[in-house]
Image (tube, rainbow, N blue to C red):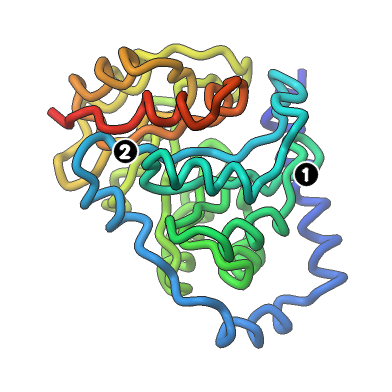
Amino acid sequence: MTTILESIVERKREEIASRQAQCPAIELEARLADSPAPRGFVDAIREARGVALIAEIKKASPSAGLIREDFDPVELAGTYQQAGATCLSCLTDEPFFQGRLEHLESVRKHVDRPVLRKDFLLDRYQLLEARVAGADAVLLIAECLGACELRELYFSADELGLDVLLEIYEPENLDRALDLDPALLGINNRNLKTFETDLGHTLRVGAGVPESTMLVAESGIRSRADVEYLAGGGVSAILVGETLMRSESVLEKTTELVGVPRR
């Protein structure tokens, strides 16, 4: 039986081929010189006084469907910045998350926080897209990539000036992730096959992560108590989307999640 992740990856490969046909990589390469200078995503998290919040702009998801109907990426980004989020994450996958690369471009122009392109990145072409759109960082998901693919994309991102949030879910992917000596390691609490969440997953899998790598907890974070729990396990940053998107007051909920001291 095909999993949700496998379906997304299959569709993504078709999408990449289509986008390359419309705008070849050589055209994106030519536009790199005019792209805005990257803002340090990793540095912002490293310099945060407490547990850094990566606040996500996400309209929908395969597991939850439509999350926020009154969806204005620029307005949300401004609210996140006002509330003290350290960095932003912008979903750019359209078929499954109702995102667009244009959302990231617009957000990048209106806030001074570093912005992550969150998508299922499988090809260097998508790194070029991200850089040209103004992304400061990209997400690489180990479960979507073979060992060679992951290494190649990781170092290609670095060559383009993009920071990387390297994400894993399965514990067996930890060693190959740490072989890259990443500055940021995200551990997804959401099973990418079943989409169920377990907040403790980050602490169990991340127990062996060296101090040189900052640990980022992703998914399932709903309250300040959750952030405090994760901070107690050595988490440096959290990535939160659905909780913020579903809030009646995005400003109040974002404010609730920032400022938790690191342990």
Q: Nearer the viewer, residue 85 or 94?
A: 85
Residue 249 badge: none
Is residue 97 depicted above or below 92 in this figure?
Answer: above
How many angstroms separate mark 1 from mark 2 (CA)? 32 Å
Residue 1: image quadrant is: top right
Mark 2, other Cα within 10 Å: few <14 / some 14–19 / many ≥20? few
Q: Position of residue 78 (x, y in %)?
A: 53, 48
Foreground: disc 1 or disc 2: 1
Residue 52 left/right relative to 113: left
Is residue 167 depicted above or below 39 in this figure?
Answer: above
Is residue 88 depicted above or below 259 in this figure?
Answer: below
Residue displayed at 63% across by 44% down: 91
Q: Position of residue 180 (x, y in %)?
A: 32, 53
Q: Position of residue 236 (x, y in %)?
A: 25, 36
Is residue 260 depicted above or below 113 in this figure?
Answer: above
Residue 41 left/right relative to 194: left
Residue displayed at 72% across by 37% down: 71
Residue 192 left/right relative to 103: left
Kind of residue at badge 2: Asp
Q: Position of residue 142 (x, y in %)?
A: 49, 41
Residue 175 badge: 2
Residue 21 left/right relative to 219: right
Q: Nearer the viewer, residue 52 or 73?
A: 73
Kind of residue at badge 1: Glu
- Report which residue position mark 1 lands on: 94
Q: Dot 1: what SS?
A: loop
